[in-house]
């Protein structure tokens, strides 16, 4: 029999090629989904223990890294995550039962009211809610139902086959990687960080305030105090914030607080207690800075009570 007669018929070549491509991708998808990650941990914890939580930390990396829940309350937990937006804060608050909840801590940063995760360069982070937190805000056929759809981050996660994963978190959900000794030589580049969080169109602020309203309504209905906080920032970051964005944020926040007098707001952005050694970068506290900040916030909560 000649080599030509033994070759695969042309109509089968493309399906076979696709199969050979999809098999390793499918195996890699299964592997990446099996890896530990903060979202999976937080979902498992809250599924088992949400009924015991009396203080819940929400928000973005500013509280994921910046607050130590165990220093706020013995039954506190952090549901905050990197780049988590108000839409997901509102979702998580309603997704788990919190019958003992008495306090909710939510950060308000210069970008909080305007950011929609799906519209950023980190859109793929929305898949963690669909894949690992039982969230149905995106459908099963959407790009948010797969790890592989964000191919570069997907490949980074595959490095765990030969590298130890860098992400670590505490039993109460705080991120632990931001240690002072691990920060880079150019850690205080506030202008770069502020530019990354800058918005020119403030119309999205209406949507952000609507999510805040939803969170405030939940807290009022369930007898929980809502504390909005602005976390400490380096002078380099504060100096680079867009004046127009800052003015719009403060106006919206002031209107919200007037209509919700039960909500407390604490602004720590320029608090003099926080020194260079308390920061990991221009807008995030280090682990030791988070411990200092958590103790300060706890005293504020206790004083109000």
Image (cartoon, rainbow, N blue to C red):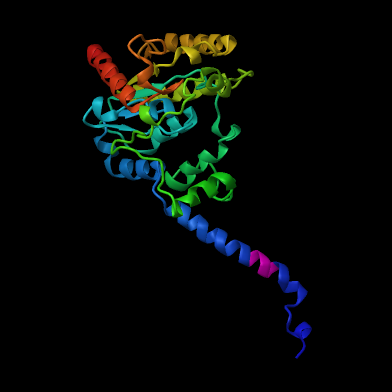
**Can see residue 18?**
yes
Q: Residue at x 54, y 49 (%)?
A: 155
Task: Report whether 204 appears left or right of 49.
Answer: right
Q: Nearer the viewer, residue 294 or 257?
A: 294
Considering every residue shown, the one lying at the far left of the view is 74
Q: Residue at x 59, y 22 (%)?
A: 204
Chief SS of the magenta region: helix
x then y, percent, for residue 182 = 39, 31
Q: Which quadrant of the view contains residue 277?
A: top left
**Can see residue 227?**
no
Q: Which quadrant of the view contains residue 119?
A: top right
Q: Nearer the viewer, residue 21 or 172?
A: 21
> Quarter of the image containing the C terminus?
top left
Is 285 one of the magenta-colored residues? no
Task: Report whether 62 appears left or right of 114.
Answer: left
Considering every residue shown, the one lying at the far bottom of the view is 1
Q: Residue at x 35, y 20 (%)?
A: 278
Q: Which quadrant of the view contains residue 72?
A: top left
x then y, percent, for residue 265 = 38, 13
Q: Which residues are magenta?
A: 15-19
Q: How many marks?
A: 0
Q: Residue at x 56, y 21 (%)?
A: 192
x then y, percent, for residue 9 = 75, 77
Asked if 243 appears above or below 19 in the picture, the reply is above
Asked if 244 appears above or below 214 in the picture, the reply is above
> Quarter of the image containing the N terminus?
bottom right
């Amino acid at each position: 029999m000649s080599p030509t007669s033994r070759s695969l018929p042309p109509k089968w070549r493309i399906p076979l090629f696709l199969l050979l491509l999809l098999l390793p991708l499918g195996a890699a998808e299964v592997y990446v989904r099996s890896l530990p990650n903060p979202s999976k941990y937080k979902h498992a914890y809250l599924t088992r223990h949400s009924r015991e939580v009396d203080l819940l930390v929400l928000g973005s990396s500013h509280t994921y890294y910046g607050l130590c829940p165990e220093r706020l309350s013995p039954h506190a937990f952090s549901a905050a995550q990197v780049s988590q937006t108000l839409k997901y804060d509102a979702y998580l608050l309603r997704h788990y039962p919190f019958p003992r909840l008495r306090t909710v801590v939510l950060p308000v940063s210069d970008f909080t009211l305007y950011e929609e995760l799906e519209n950023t360069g980190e859109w793929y982070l929305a898949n963690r809610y669909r894949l690992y937190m039982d969230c149905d805000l995106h459908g099963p056929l959407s790009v948010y139902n797969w790890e592989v759809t964000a191919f570069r981050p997907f490949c980074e996660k595959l490095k765990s086959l030969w590298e130890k994963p860098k992400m670590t978190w505490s039993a109460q959900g705080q991120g632990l990687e931001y240690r002072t000794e691990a920060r880079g030589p150019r850690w205080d580049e506030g202008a770069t960080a502020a530019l990354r969080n800058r918005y020119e169109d403030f119309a999205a602020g209406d949507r952000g305030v609507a999510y805040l309203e939803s969170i405030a309504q939940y807290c009022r209905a369930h007898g929980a105090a809502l504390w909005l906080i602005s976390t400490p920032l380096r002078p380099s970051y504060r100096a680079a914030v867009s004046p127009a964005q800052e003015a719009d944020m403060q106006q919206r926040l002031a209107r919200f607080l007037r209509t919700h007098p039960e909500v407390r707001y604490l602004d720590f952005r320029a608090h003099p207690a926080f020194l260079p050694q308390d920061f990991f970068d221009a807008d995030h506290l280090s682990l030791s800075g988070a411990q200092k900040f958590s103790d300060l916030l706890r005293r504020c909560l206790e004083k109000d009570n």
